[in-house]
Amino acid sequence: MIIYNPKDWLHAVLSFHRSETIKKLYPYLILMAIYAWAIAYLEIEYLKLSEKSWLRNIPSMHSLLGFVLSILLVFRTNTAYDRWWEGRKLWGQLTNNSRNLALRIESLLPEGDKGNRSFYKKCIPLFASTLREHLQSSQTRFMLDEKDHPEFNHLDENKHGPNQVAAMIFKRTDTLYREGVISGDQLIILNTELLSFTDICGACERIKNTPIPFTYTSFIKKFISIYVLTLPYGFVFSLGYFVVPAVVFAFYVLTSLELIAEEIEDPFGTDVNDLPLEKMADNIRKHVGELIH
């Protein structure tokens, strides 16, 4: 994720990043320029169409459809940003709940209980890192503690990683209750934080596994393509060969909005504007390590 100063207009306008849409669209912009020039040459030089040609009335159709297209693109980008922001809120909630659980574990466990402290110190941030790998569809790899915890030996990398880690934390907490280390009231207090882990995981999976309906995105792409490809036919009468940069610019603006929406609708990926999940997981590990001694 790019960290920037929103008040620095000059830097925002002049800087280019590897996620810039102009770099992705560069070959298509060249093709669009050639296409617009060919249409302009055909109508002006070869066919020598006059301003009385019926093609001159095509821009009236673009004026009507442009309003519809703008509404569709606004809805598209807003929907994509809502998914990105919801993912950010979920990982912020995971960070807060991890800290709260670490604080309560530190205060509830006896002073000399180093074994259970070591387990929670490792396992709480392990959930965040496992969830990150799960959402990014990479094979889950578990970081083992320096102390021997038998629970880690039974983890199956082919199964749902976050569920396994959450189950380990639940079982260890229940064992503490059965052994009398924590009371029933304290177990109820911890249960709220423990349940929130699987709730957050499920909410993240909902975003990850439920993309924008294909029919909707396919329709917008077709609409943009037809809209831009028909621009030179009518505007060449009023713009002449200047229709070439005009069409290229219109194509760049419209397709860039769609590409931006495609990039941020999955906030758990590895694109430059996606959420920095690895950094968030590292921060959770750092903060839990500071809280549990």
Image (cartoon, rainbow, N blue to C red):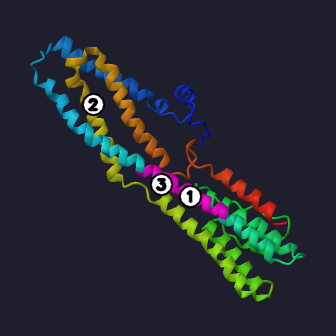
| Residue 232 falls in image quadrant | top left
Q: Distance between the residues labelled 2 and 3?
A: 31 Å
The residue at the point 20 percent across, 29 percent down is 59
Quadrant of the rendering where the N terminus is positioned: top right
Residue 128 in picture, x, y percent from top left: 66, 61
Identify which residue, 55 or 184, lies in the foreground. 184
Q: In this view, does 273 lie to the left or right of 78?
A: right
**Prevailing secondary structure class for the magenta stretch in the rendered image:** helix
Chain-order first, disc 2 or disc 1:
1
Secondary structure under badge 1?
helix
The residue at the point 17 percent across, 31 percent down is 60
The residue at the point 41 percent across, 49 percent down is 78
- Report the residue marked by disc 2: 229
Residues shaded magenta: 79-96
Identify which residue, 212 or 94, lies in the foreground. 94
Q: Which residue lies furthest to the top in this view?
A: 45
Identify which residue, 151 or 235, lies in the foreground. 235
Residue 196 in picture, x, y percent from top left: 60, 71
Residue 112 in picture, x, y percent from top left: 90, 76
- Report the residue marked by disc 1: 89
Identify which residue, 32 or 81, lies in the foreground. 81
- Report the residue marked by disc 3: 83
The residue at the point 71 percent across, 70 percent down is 101
Is residue 149 something one can see in this rendering? no
Disc 1 marks which amino acid? Lys
Is residue 111 something one can see in this rendering? yes
Q: In this view, does 180 lie above or below 163?
A: below
- Are there few (<14), some (14-19), or many (20+) residues within 10 Å of tag 3? many
